Image (cartoon, rainbow, N blue to C red):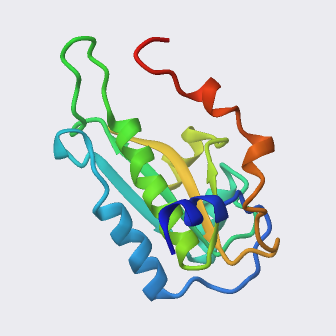
Amino acid sequence: MDFITIAKQRFSVRTYTDKKVEAEKLDKILEAAHVAPTAANRQPVHLIAVQSKEGLEKIGKAANIYGAPLAIIVCADHDKAWIRPFDKKQTGDIDASILTDHMMLQATELGLGTVWVCYFKPDVLRKEFDLPTNMEPINILVIGYSDEGEADINRFGQQRISMSELVSYDKL
């Protein structure tokens, strides 16, 4: 399958079956994160893969994970992140997002559904998972077998801004 097809097939899944994600598939998803690029190759990220009932309940105190059997808490390590010298922009959140996107698309290729959750209570995740102060939870990638069918791969003509609104050449 080519990249554009995978990207078009991915959609936000909010209803999952109770089928567990196989270890081999989780390994491939985590490998996709492992090979993702980061600023200056600092790799200022940490993933917490949560599959246990107890762990999923802990996440459930902070966010809706839609009954999925797997959730990955994606954290940025502020002690390791590269900092742009001109304006002191720290890139940990960007790096964490790149890893999340790689995992999300790998999961799609493997026939799994995902939803990228940013609506969560970070203080609750910090407490429940005993995160140190340098480790910021950036998002939660929810993964499982979709109970919603497949996405309409032709939906982008109606759901996206036009290419001319998205792209300009040589000036704004």
The mark total stands at 0
Location of residue 113 (image quadrant): bottom right
- Location of residue 66 in the rendering, given as x and y in whole percent from the top left corner: 75, 63
Q: Is residue 29 left or right of residue 44?
A: right
Q: Nearer the viewer, residue 101 or 46?
A: 101
The quadrant where residue 135 appears: top left
Q: Position of residue 116 (x, y in %)?
A: 61, 52
| Residue at x 53%, y 54% (from the top left corner) | 128
Query: From the viewer's perspective, is residue 112 above or below residue 32?
Result: below
Q: For the point 46% across and 63% down, which residue is it? A: 103
**Which of 109/63 is in front?**
109
Front one among 153 and 126: 153
Q: Is residue 130 visible?
A: no
Residue 166 is situated, as x and y percent measured from the top left of the image, at 59, 28
Q: Is residue 57 above or below residue 94?
A: below
Is residue 95 or residue 121 the one in the foreground?
A: 95
What residue appears at the point 61 percent right and 42 percent down from the top-left corner?
118
- Residue 79 in sight in this render: yes
- Against 111, is 169 above or below? above
Q: Position of residue 107 (x, y in %)?
A: 53, 71
Q: Is residue 161 left or right of residue 106?
A: right
Residue at left 24%, top 49%? 43
